[in-house]
Amino acid sequence: MTTETDTPDPSGHPVTGLDEVVHQRVRLGILAIAHEARRVEFGYLRTHLDLTAGNLSKHLTVLETAGLIDIEKGYEGKRGRTWITLTPAGNTALAEEIGRLKVLIARVETTTEDQ
Amino acid sequence: MRFANLVLAQTGLLWKPIAMTTDSVSAGDDPHRLLADVRNLVGRVRRDQRLTWVALLTLAVVTVGAIPFDWLFMKVRCDGSGCMFARRGMLYYWPPALLIAYAVIAVSYVRAARARGLGARVLPYAITGAATAVVFTAAYTAAAAYFPSHPPFGGGPVPFWWIVLDRLIAPWGLIGLALLVLARLERNVALLLFTLAYLALVLVVLPTTDGMHLPEWGIPSFMSGTDIQPRLAMTPPQLIVGAVLLAGGIGFSKAHRKQQR
């Protein structure tokens, strides 16, 4: 499961609330694509994230183990296809990660302005 | 040299992460960059899911296909004071044509998205389109039953808002309303602008429900009968709407191909 999915404490630094599973650029990319596409095929992810099949599989396993995605394997004709969909927990985790990133950016910009 | 490339390659979702591990990156990774990469990927998915040109071309074909039905099934009754006409062909043609068109569009979207390895977001558009077919049928049937015995505004001149409302619940206006839903689903600003211009044309400019009266010199002599006049008058607005949808379809098709390169 994810290590931390709660909304970051506004009094603490947003970095303390970062989800170790989601706060990783490839996995964040997988979640973002799956969210926008509703369901996405393994090949599309591999092409657009520019990963090897093995590397992508590792990331998908991490996300599936955390309960953030569902992986469905099937066939279209003779061709095997793997479809990835976001679970409700994955949707929440993505939204929270985006929120935390925006908070981080706002903090950094505020700090820069203060200096 | 290769190590320098490795360092650079770490910072983008769209770049090949040569030294990728399944470990999370440090919390200090640039959030600006992460968010920008997410936006790029999401934008790419949206562009790959779009099939706007198919929707517009299908609707153009349906619009032009309505012209012979309108012509053949229009009931015209003329006397010394003028002509009365009832566009029966609209009721026979448009409800099934709209349902078939939206089914074709939905199936095309789903098949194209699946071929690219994506899901499709077209269902709300298809449902809206089917709902417009129901709205049109109900409104047209109710108007045909009620207005002959209760002419609006006592048979006198009708205000402009009434004309706009009349055009809005006609098939060409409803096509525009459904296109607004598609533009929202696709987050497609170009389609939104096209649809707004299209709606302005069919609601405000083109006399889609009243017909466009052609000058005498523009009518061939073999079409000069009084019962042909209303039929002729209804044709140009439909041709113009069909041409606009066709031009939009071709334009979006070219833009789509350009983006895919």
Image: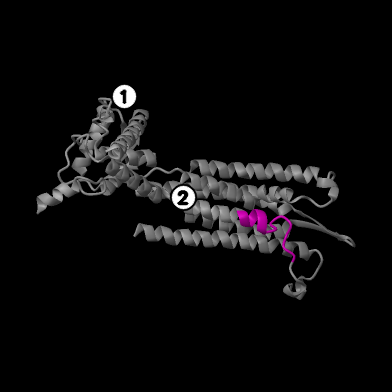
**Where does residue B22 sit, x and y in percent of width and height?**
19, 36
Which amino acid, by three-letter code, is at mark 2?
Asn
**Where does residue B230 sit, x and y in percent of width and height?**
76, 62
The residue segment tinted magenta is: B200-213
Judge whether residue A81 can be spotted in this image.
Answer: no
Which amino acid, by three-letter code, is at mark 1?
Ser
- Would residue B135 be found to the left or right of residue A43 on screen? right
Residue sitting at x 66%, y 61%:
B237
* Residue identifier under label 2: B188
Residue sitting at x 24%, y 48%:
A50
**Where does residue A19 sit, x and y in percent of width and height?**
26, 29
Task: Tell which of B19 and A18 is nearer to you.
Answer: A18
**Same-chain status of marks 2 and 1:** no
Task: Tell which of B75 and B206 is nearer to you.
Answer: B206
Task: Tell which of B80 and B210 is nearer to you.
Answer: B210
- At label 1, counting other C-alpha atoms closer than 10 Å, the crowd grade (few under 14, some 14-19, many 20 or more) is few
Callout 2: SS? loop
Residue sitting at x 63%, y 50%:
B173
Judge whether residue B209 can be spotted in this image.
Answer: yes
* Residue identifier under label 1: A11
Q: Closer to us: mark 2 or mark 1?
A: 1
Callout 1: SS? loop
**Where does residue B234 sit, x and y in percent of width and height?**
71, 60
